[in-house]
Amino acid sequence: MNLNPSTSEPEPDPAYRPSGQPSVLGGLQDYLFSYGTLQLESVQIATFGRLMHGQTDQLPGYRLGQLRITDPMVLATSGQPVHLMVSYSGEAGDVVEGMVFAVSRDELLNADTYEVADYRRERVTLASGLVAWVYVDARGARRPGP
């Protein structure tokens, strides 16, 4: 496992691009996979201060579930009392459709603030081969390491 020289964070996959390197999606430093409310314009404006432009992708080995939201700020931002949530299954037939966005470190931290404690952020490899962050069920099994 290599360390990202800019942040000293582990890079679990060689497809990951360290901070400062160009990305496929516009030169920003990280990728964020969204399968739910982070795709909504209202949530993007409130969370990132801009509309996000990304590309479709898939998250293999995960399945969708639902989470009832009680946090008033998240409810006000999304307008939805039930959000989607993914959990690792490891099953080849389980695939979650979504969008992958290029984000800055600050935008990633803003997304951390938006997501409730029922989610945790994990780095995953998408069907396209891109390595991205995704919010998963905090109670669920962790994907085995590289």
Image (cartoon, grey):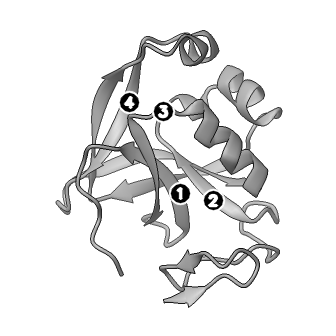
Instruction: Give the label on residue 84, or none.
Output: 4
Q: Looking at the image, do the residues carrying marks 3 and 4 touch, with CB atoms under 8 Å apart? A: yes
Position above or below: 51 against 21: above
Instruction: Give the label on residue 69, or none.
Output: none
Q: Where residue 115 appears, x then y in whole percent?
A: 53, 34
Instruction: Work out how far the residue at label 1 is from the one at label 2, CA to CA, in angstroms.
Output: 6 Å
Mark 4 lies on a secondary structure that is strand
Residue with the mark numbered 1: 133
Check disc 3: other Cα within 10 Å, few if <14, some if 14-19, many if 20+.
some
Position above or below: 135 against 6: above
Instruction: Work out how far the residue at label 3 is from the one at label 4, CA to CA, in angstroms.
Output: 6 Å
Q: Looking at the image, do the residues carrying marks 1 and 2 touch, with CB atoms under 8 Å apart? A: yes
Amino acid of disc 2: Tyr
Q: Where residue 122 appears, x then y in whole percent?
A: 45, 58
Circle nearer the N terminus (2, 3):
2
- The residue located at (76%, 78%) in the rendering is 6
- The residue located at (36%, 81%) in the rendering is 146
Q: Where residue 91 appears, x then y in whole percent?
A: 17, 60
Mark 1 lies on a secondary structure that is strand
Left or right of residue 8, residue 138 in this image: left
Observer-nearest of 76 and 91: 76
Q: Looking at the image, do the residues carrying marks 3 and 1 touch, with CB atoms under 8 Å apart? A: no
Position above or below: 92 against 86: below
Residue with the mark numbered 2: 31
- The residue located at (38%, 34%) in the rendering is 118
Left or right of residue 57, residue 27 in this image: right
